[in-house]
Image (cartoon, helix red, strand yellow):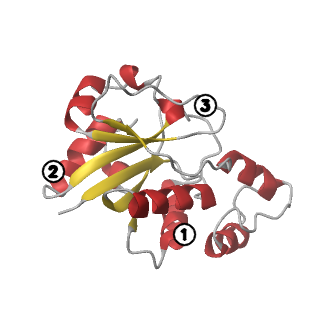
Amino acid sequence: MGKVGLLFGSFNPIHTGHLILANFMATHTDLSEVWLVVSPQSPDKVGQELLPEQQRLHLAQLAIAGNDRLRALDVEFSLPRPSYTIDTLEELRRRYPAQQFVLLMGEDNMPGLPRWKEAARILAEYEIYVYPRPGVRTADASALPRVRIVPAPLLDISATFIRACVRNGQSIRYLVPEAVEKQILAAGYWR
């Protein structure tokens, strides 16, 4: 039984920054795997140009094909919406009782953590590995014994920028894996 990191996101679309981060966490920490939890609709992303969840899951699966340390999950698709992290953690614990789950979180989310549903319980029951984000000052986690700051590569690539490139007919080569680029262009996403 190993530790499994959970990277939550809308992955709209999944891009190189997500993949480098997930692979870094799976290979440079004590995690045995990282699971990408594709969120159906984040409470704070309502109204964004979100591809249907199955299409975003498919892009994530294309992106990680061949990497046995990464996995894409649709666990939140069957949970009540909006989905809250604690509910997803409980469902994963129920489905995979032998696994030890670690929450992967960008430093930009740290200030809002106390307002999360059942935040105290998350902090008490789960480890959290925090990775740096562009333009965010390093979080002080000294008062939180289960929170660890991980010096992962800082990558300033955004799905918003990639969608704008697609809309404007600009290249997204190397911003997303080749298989993802082909699917986005073939399906006409964000055109």
Q: Residues within 10 Å of mark 3 (few under 14, many from 20)?
A: few
Left or right placement of residue 111 versus residue 1 in this view: right
Q: Is residue 87 above or below residue 116?
A: below
Give percent across and percent down for residue 117. Answer: 32, 25
How many numbered badges does the structure rendering display? Answer: 3
- N-terminal label among 2 and 1: 1
- N-terminal label among 2 and 3: 2
Left or right placement of residue 172 versus residue 122 in this view: right
Q: Quadrant of the C terminus?
A: bottom right
Q: Quadrant of the N terminus?
A: bottom left
Circle 2 is placed at which residue position?
94
Q: CA distance from mark 3 to mark 1?
A: 27 Å
Q: Residue at x 26, y 43 (%)?
A: 89
Inspect the image, locate mark 1, and give the three-letter code of the amino acid beneath it: Ala
Inspect the image, locate mark 2, and give the three-letter code of the amino acid beneath it: Arg
Residue placed most toward the observer, 94 or 46: 94
Q: Residue at x 66, y 50 (%)?
A: 159
Q: CA distance from mark 2 to mark 3?
A: 35 Å
Inspect the image, locate mark 3, and give the three-letter code of the amino acid beneath it: Val
Q: Residue at x 58, y 39 (%)?
A: 133
Q: Is residue 42 above or below residue 65?
A: above
Residue placed most toward the observer, 142 or 32: 142
* Mark sitting on residue 136: 3
Residue 182 placement: quadrant: bottom right
In the picture as drawn, the residue positioned furthest to the bottom comes out as: 66
Left or right placement of residue 191 versus residue 37 in this view: right
Secondary element under disc 2, as helix, strand or loop, is helix
Circle 1 is placed at which residue position?
63
Secondary element under disc 3, as helix, strand or loop, is loop
* Mark sitting on residue 169: none
Instruction: Please say whether residue 39 is visible from this viewpoint.
Output: no
